[in-house]
Amino acid sequence: MRTQIAAMAATLLAACSTVHHEAGNALTETTTKSADAYAQCLAPKWQAFVPSATSTATATGWSIVAAAQFTGEQAIATIDTEGAGAKVTVFLPPEWAGTTAWTNMARACL
């Protein structure tokens, strides 16, 4: 029984994560900056906006995540090495679609 509940919970969490990324692609840009340099620019901006924002190295670059305090909704920036520069994608929850602060901060670092 516990195994079935754990499997169901994992499935539901995976489904929510997938929908979040597909529904909330707010910005996709390329930059001549390296993934490291871009992450060093964007992370402090998001942390000033949401102090609990985290920056994590990935196999292809960086991921920066900022969660809303009460709802847990997340803004996510993926910074992937692409040639000599990087590809930047910002994902926002659908409820944040009208919010420009996240994408403005991302554009300021390009």
Image (cartoon, rainbow, N blue to C red):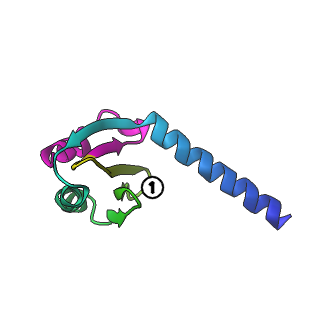
Q: Position of residue 57 (x, y in %)?
A: 36, 65
Q: Is residue 20 above or below residue 47?
A: above
To which residue does mark 1 refer? Answer: 72
Q: Position of residue 34 (x, y in %)?
A: 20, 55
Left or right placement of residue 37 versus residue 94 in this view = left
| Residue 93 placement: quadrant | top left
Residue lying at 30% horizontally and 33% vertically, measured from the top left: 98
Left or right placement of residue 8 versus residue 53 in this view = right
Mark 1 belongs to which amino acid? Answer: Gly
Q: Nearer the viewer, residue 51 or 110?
A: 110
Q: Which residues are magenta?
A: 87-110
Q: Position of residue 32 (x, y in %)?
A: 16, 46
Q: Decide if residue 99 is in sight here.
A: no
Q: Residue furthest right?
A: 1
Left or right placement of residue 17 versus residue 109 in this view = right
The quadrant of the image that shows the C terminus is top left
| Residue 26 placement: quadrant | top left
Magenta stretch contains residue 4? no
Q: Is residue 80 above or below residue 59?
A: above
Residue lying at 81% horizontally and 66% vertically, measured from the top left: 2
Q: Decide if residue 3 is in sight here.
A: yes
Magenta stretch contains residue 102? yes
Label 1: few (<14), some or many (≥20) within 10 Å?
few
Q: Nearer the viewer, residue 16 or 31?
A: 31
